[in-house]
């Protein structure tokens, strides 16, 4: 889980208070850690908001909705829109 000191800022940026010690403690590279934090935040937005998927992608720092969909599917095994339908 994301530590309380970790903040996902608008645009999907991780706050500086995160540091890369969190990444090291998980055995992930900093870029893997950040990507996973962005995808976890996106998952929350999919579940708890009615924002369109493209807006969630943008909010979480992805410049391309198709790249976001690809990475979401890779991490969670399901496309974002299909994931949302589970909660409707």
Image (cartoon, grey):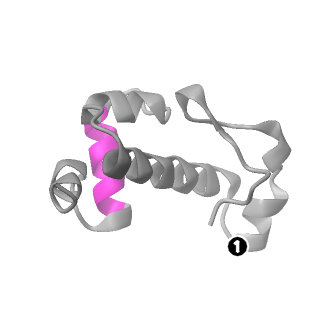
Residues 31 and 83: in front is 83
Total number of numbered labels? 1
Residue 80 percent across, percent down from the top left: 25, 50
Q: Is residue 15 above or below residue 63?
A: below
**Residue on which disc 1 sits:** 27
Q: Is residue 62 above or below residue 74?
A: above
Q: From what the image shows, is residue 27 above or below residue 6?
A: below
Residue 68 in magenta stretch: yes
Q: Residue at coordinates 28% horizontally, 30% vertically from top-left?
A: 54
User: Can you say which quadrant of the picture contains the C terminus?
Assistant: bottom left
Classify mark 1: helix, strand or loop.
Answer: loop
Taking the spot 22% from the left edge, 58% from the top edge, the residue there is: 83
Q: Residues within 10 Å of mark 1 (few under 14, many from 20)?
A: few
**Quarter holding the N terminus?**
bottom right
The part of the chain drawn in magenta is 65-74
* Residue 41 at x, y percent in the picture: 49, 48
| Main secondary structure along the magenta-highlighted residues | helix
Front position in the image: 36 or 83: 83
Residue at 73% x, 60% y is 3
Name the side, left or right, on which 38 lies relative to 15.
Answer: left
Write the residue at 25% across / 37% down: 66
Decide if residue 66 is on the left or right side of residue 40.
left
Residue 25 on the magenta span: no
**In the figure, residue 23 lies in which quadrant?**
bottom right
- Please state the horizontal and vertical placement of residue 38, each as a whole percent of the image: 52, 46
């Amino acid at each position: 889980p994301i530590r309380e000191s970790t903040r996902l800022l608008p645009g999907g940026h991780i706050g500086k208070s995160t540091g890369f010690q969190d990444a090291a403690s998980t055995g992930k590279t900093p870029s893997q850690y950040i990507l996973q934090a962005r995808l976890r935040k996106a998952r929350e937005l999919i579940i708890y908001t009615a924002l369109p998927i493209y807006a969630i992608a943008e909010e979480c720092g992805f410049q391309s909705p198709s790249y976001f969909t690809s990475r979401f599917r890779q991490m969670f095994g399901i496309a974002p829109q299909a994931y949302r339908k589970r909660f409707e």
